[in-house]
Image (cartoon, rainbow, N blue to C red):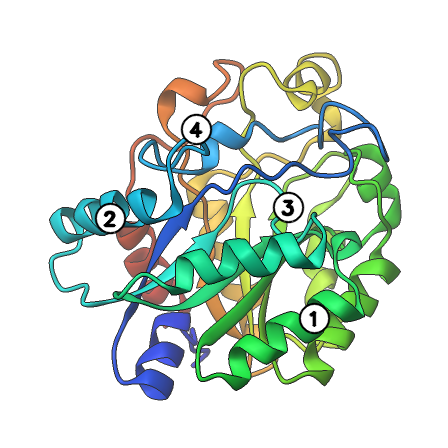
Amino acid sequence: MAELNSFVDFFRAKYGARMQKVVVDAGFTCPNRDGSKGTGGCSFCLNNAFHPNYCTPDKPIHQQIDEGIEFHRVRYRHAQRYIAYFQPYSNTYAPVERLRELYAAALSHPLIEGLVIGTRPDCIDEEKLDLLASIQDEGKIVIVEYGIESCYDRTLERIGRGHDFECARRAVEATAERGLTQCAHFIFGLPGESLSQMMDEADIINTLSLTSVKFHQLQIIKGTRMEEEYRTRRQDFHEFTLDGYLDFMAEFISRLRSDIYIDRFASEVPPRYLSPLQKGWGLIRYQELLAMLRQRMK
């Protein structure tokens, strides 16, 4: 029987408890928004759809953490240990001294035990990795999350990522060399990719020195370039039904290396952000989807 190695289990085994992420918005941008590589961001992206309302860059980091912990204490009553999740945009896209200042502000909060840093493969370098490694050497938890999205260069170009897959591979390997825990994001259902091509990505992911992965089904967000592409070239998209996605993920996960943990296998986006053009699965919470997947894998 294929098994799903949950990233929650990784935390419990390594740190003795579940670690709850508290999202922090430190006011970063990314290179395909500020004009250095492009403007408007990736074609699928509207960042507000992917992070909670309590974190906004006009609030001090400590205030965001306090409000985030209160939010999670209501929603997840068993949460006792917390890590600051620098999530919106590219959270290594600044000079090292600025990064050091922002990370230190989060780590100075008495209830924060570490950092999760969401970023792009083209926004990391040796100096930034050395900074993250030094924080880990001080006994703090450090996890680097890379948005990779696809293993295929033609897809990365089509969605406007601004980097190729080899860039992602270099970033992952350089991060692994420093002993840092790392996660990578991938999206299934991007335009131009067939079901068999998506399944073949399992073999490519197995060649990367990753600790964990996050998989998302493509959800079309209002007002994005992807919405317009979906409107005019819908035939280029493989659309997953719920049952189809569960079947796909059960097979995909069974092909992954046994030491790769699954952080997420599906995304949740508030309904107000979703395009009316796409027929979704309804309001199914992630824990319900996870139970369905586990049953499917049996």
Image location of residue 143, percent across then percent down: 53, 69
Q: Residues within 10 Å of mark 2 (few under 14, many from 20)?
A: some
All told, the count of numbered labels is: 4
- Is residue 134 toward the left or the right of residue 273 in the image? right
Cα–Cα gap, marks 2 and 4: 34 Å
From the image, state whether disc 3 or disc 2 is nearer to you.
Answer: 2
Cβ atoms under marks 3 and 2 closer than 8 Å: no
Quadrant assignment for the C terminus: bottom left
Residue identified by numbered label 3: 90
Which residue corresponds to mark 4?
280
Which of the labelled discs sits on residue 20, or is there none? none
Q: Are marks 3 and 1 in contact (CB under 8 Å)?
A: no
Identify the amino acid type marked 3. Answer: Ser
| Mark 1 vs 2, N-terminal side | 2
The residue closer to the viewer here, 276 or 264, is 264
Figure check: 230 above or below 201: above
Foreground residue, 218 or 51? 51
Q: What residue sits 40% from the left and 80% below the top? A: 10
